Image (tube, grey):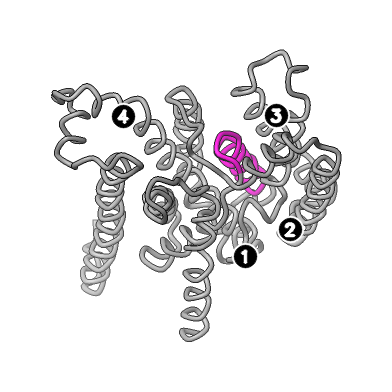
């Protein structure tokens, strides 16, 4: 075997150093997530000391009240914030990649609007549904999110899954479900209308360990499938023609990724309502810190999404002591100025 050229040594060393730095960024995000998770368990109407929370988590707490608050009330909410944030961050990263659009998210394709319409329909049906409301609403939201995905994906299959066509079909789907949702709100009774509006705000307070398990299962199934296509998604960043020249089946890849996004978004939105900006901001943060290589960007986007929503959960309990703000309002209040800063920073670099 011929020896490698002398110039390849520094190049390989630089490549390894860059990979180590990217891995370190994800590890730092996970460390921050651990801190935010502990703070989420400690904050609330009854403020708890962090050592007592950690002891309760380890099963060594001697105060029954603290144990009950941590395990029964706050642990499902804190876990739900992490897994939903990870799902939204991951779905946003994939969406921006397959559409080659930094402003894309699950809302762009109307998936969240479909989920909102399904939830509102289940709320209006009420006792007529064969399932308890705690599960009927999430199932209806997930089902209509899948329907929105099928509508947009069907258009893509008929006319070719180009980014422009998927965006246009998604916008049409978005306005359709928003119009149908407005119609349901117009027909709803005051009590049902209040419940619909509260669901659309987004809230983690309806979380349970069973629901956390469902979102975690979807995330655990979808993430490895996306990582298997990581190099193909990276090649897609160079444009469809270059990706095809490298042997990538662009249309099939785009539809597979789109299906994965719909599963992630549907599972997340079904249980907590519509939560904006996580799927938009988290991929931008990951892209700035680890670059476009999807092998690193996908895990980083999931980690930063989980960190952002967990931090928003903490903030929602600190804005007004004794009151828990709807998480969707908090993410919007945090996300709008942060995203504006990202856009301005991007323009300055350009």
* Label 4: element kind: helix
Residue corresponding to mark 4: 69
- Say the numbered circle drawn on residue 295: none
Q: Identify the residue at horizontal 20%, vertical 28% (top origin).
A: 56
Q: Earlier in the sequence, mark 1 or mark 3?
A: 1
Answer whether labels 3 and 4 touch (C-beta < 8 Å). Answer: no
Residue 139 locus on image (x, y percent): 65, 26
Write down the region rendered in magenta. 252-273
Residue 179 locus on image (x, y percent): 84, 49
User: Left of 206 or right of it: where is 34?
Assistant: left
Q: Label 2 vs label 1: CA separation?
A: 9 Å
Residue 271 falls inside the magenta stretch: yes
Residue corresponding to mark 1: 101
Q: Dominant secondary structure of the magenta stretch?
A: helix
* Label 2: element kind: helix
Answer whether labels 1 and 3 touch (C-beta < 8 Å). Answer: no
Q: Earlier in the sequence, mark 3 or mark 4?
A: 4
User: Left of 60 or right of it: where is 331?
Assistant: right
User: Left of 298 or right of it: where is 106?
Assistant: right
Q: Label 2 vs label 3: CA separation?
A: 24 Å
Q: Identify the residue at horizontal 61%, vertical 60% (top origin).
A: 245
Q: Identify the residue at horizontal 67%, vertical 44% (top origin).
A: 197
């Amino acid at each position: 075997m011929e020896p490698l050229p002398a110039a390849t040594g520094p190049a390989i060393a630089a490549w390894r150093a860059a990979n180590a730095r990217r891995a370190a960024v994800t590890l730092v995000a996970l460390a921050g997530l651990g801190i935010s998770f502990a703070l989420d368990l400690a904050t609330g109407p009854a403020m708890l000391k962090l050592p007592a929370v950690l002891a309760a988590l380890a099963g060594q707490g001697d105060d029954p009240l603290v144990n009950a608050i941590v395990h029964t009330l706050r642990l499902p909410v804190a876990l739900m914030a992490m897994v939903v944030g990870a799902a939204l961050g991951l779905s946003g990263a994939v969406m921006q990649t397959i559409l080659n659009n930094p402003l894309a998210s699950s809302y762009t394709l109307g998936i969240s609007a479909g989920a909102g319409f399904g939830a509102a329909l289940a709320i209006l049906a009420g006792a007529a549904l064969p399932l308890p409301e705690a599960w009927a609403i999430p199932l209806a939201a997930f089902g209509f999110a899948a329907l929105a995905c099928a509508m947009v994906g069907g258009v893509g299959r008929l006319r070719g899954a180009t980014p422009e066509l998927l965006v246009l079909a998604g916008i049409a789907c978005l306005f359709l479900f928003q119009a149908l949702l407005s119609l349901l709100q117009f027909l709803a009774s005051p009590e049902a209308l209040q419940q619909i509006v509260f669901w659309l705000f987004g809230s983690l307070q309806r979380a349970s360990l069973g629901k956390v398990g469902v979102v975690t299962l979807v995330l655990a199934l979808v993430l490895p499938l996306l990582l298997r296509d990581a190099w193909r998604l990276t090649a897609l960043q160079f444009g469809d023609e270059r990706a095809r020249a490298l042997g990538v089946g662009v249309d099939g890849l785009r539809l597979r990724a789109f299906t994965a996004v719909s599963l992630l978004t549907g599972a997340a939105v079904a249980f907590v309502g519509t939560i904006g900006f996580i799927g938009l901001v988290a991929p931008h943060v990951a892209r700035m810190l680890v670059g476009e290589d999807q092998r690193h960007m996908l895990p980083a986007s999931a980690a930063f999404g989980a960190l952002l929503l967990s931090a928003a959960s903490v903030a929602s309990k600190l804005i007004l002591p004794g009151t828990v703000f709807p998480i969707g309002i908090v993410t919007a209040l945090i996300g709008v100025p942060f995203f504006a800063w990202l856009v301005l920073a991007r323009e300055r670099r350009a």
